[in-house]
Amino acid sequence: MKKIDLRSDTVTQPTMEMRQAMFDAMVGDDVYQEDPTVRQLEETAAAVLGKEAALLVTSGTQGNQLAVLAWCRPGEEIILEENSHIFLYEGGAVSALAGVQTRTVPGVRGAIQPEDLMKAIRDDDIHHPDTGLICMENTHNRAGGAVVPPESMKAVYEIAKECGIPVHLDGARLFNAAAASGIPVQEFTQYVDTVQVCLSKGLGAPIGSILAGPRDVIERARKWRKRLGGGMRQAGVIAAPGLIALTKMADRLAEDHKHARQLAQGLTAMGLQIDNQVETNIILINMVKSGQDREAFLRQLAEQGILAGGMGEEHVRFVTNYHITAEDVQTVLDTVQQMLKQTV
Ligand SMILES: *Cc1c(COP(=O)(O)O)cnc(C)c1O
């Protein structure tokens, strides 16, 4: 039985082309900045994202943390959307590593609202921490892969610039936002100073993220990466599949979105409650509103070879990715249909 793995787009395995590119990669010592394949990836990524410079990092978490470390000093405060990955899922690293405190604001489908942002930015007062950084997330994971529109990012960026505060984008799935909206990636990234994108999620690379931004900030991040033990040697074997991910895999994300919509439509037709709009590759089924026992649902799916995960208290999360075919979508729908028949 083929496993249908909907737990995440991180489960994607490198394509044959990626594996061949790893085998063939020209390499050197990247701590000396002598790995030609890493340099090529970093230059290509900077160009794709419309930034001066880019850095290959081990993970999305590392990229986000390096941004905070490069922009902030201990004792500063960073502003985050309250369901953001940096706030919820990075082990408190911003406090543990950068020594900053967090201030969260509510989001509307993941988007920070200008009026909330203005209230959260600190004024010049001897009692207050300084606001060191504002972070956005796009697509927004907890909001169910929601696309934050460029106009919304622009509003945040303009306020930040008026106050002289840098802006970072956690763009782990930014290419999904571009594929779903038809809006080029640079129309999003023009409204941030630094951006992190994951090569290892829907784009399919085995390892790695990119942090891109102004050259001086990226050089500070490079030093922090070394301090954290992230200075890699012949990292061209990682960069080679990363280049394929960056240049060849973004366009096919629309297929994952189509499959997610088909799944969502089918599940809705069976009476399950889906809480998000399913703009990209994430589906959040509300098991409480659907009148289902989440653990039993997940266990029964797993018995049929279909893997999914829980999110928050109430949701089951399905994430489509390039291993999921149109046939798999049908198999999942048929299986869920059978399961629901048995529970009534
Ligand atoms: C996955 C993810 C990250 C972290 O990436 P890792 O490579 O798992 O460290 C950061 N932000 C968002 C929104 C993510 O979905």
Image: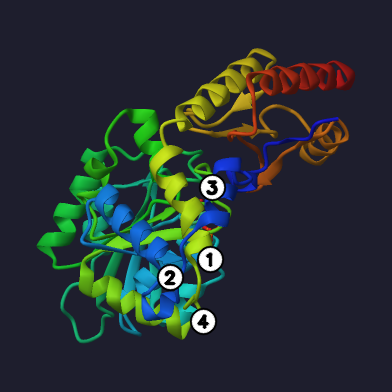
Residue hosting label 3 = 201
Nearest the eye: 297 or 107:
297
From the viewer's perspective, tell me whether residue 207 is left or right of residue 244: right
Q: Quadrant of the N terminus?
A: top right
Label 2: which residue? 65
The CB of the residue at mark 2 lies under 8 Å from ligand 1: no
Q: Position of residue 140 (x, y in %)?
A: 44, 45
Residue at figure coordinates x 57%, y 48% from the top left:
20
Binning the other alpha carbons within 10 Å of mark 2 as few (below 14), some (14 to 19) or many (20 upward) gives: many
Q: Which residue is labeled 1 in the image?
A: 90
Residue 342 visible in rendering: yes
- 299, 193: nearer the viewer: 193
Which residue type does callout 4 highlight?
Gly
Between discs 2 and 4, the one toward the N terminus: 2
Distance between mark 4 and mark 1 Cα atoms: 17 Å
Secondary structure category for the residue under label 4: loop
Instruction: Give whichever of discs 3 and 4 has the lower sequence position.
Output: 3
**Which mark, by number, is residue 229?**
4
Label 2 residue SS: helix
Which image quarter holds the C terminus?
A: top right
Mark 3–mark 2 contact, CB under 8 Å? no
Q: Residues within 10 Å of mark 1 (few under 14, many from 20)?
A: some
Comparing labels 3 and 2, the label whose residue is closer to the camera: 3
Under 8 Å from ligand 1: the CB of mark 1? yes
Q: What residue is shown at x 64% (from left), y 29% (from top)?
A: 324
Q: Nearer the viewer, residue 238 or 88?
A: 238
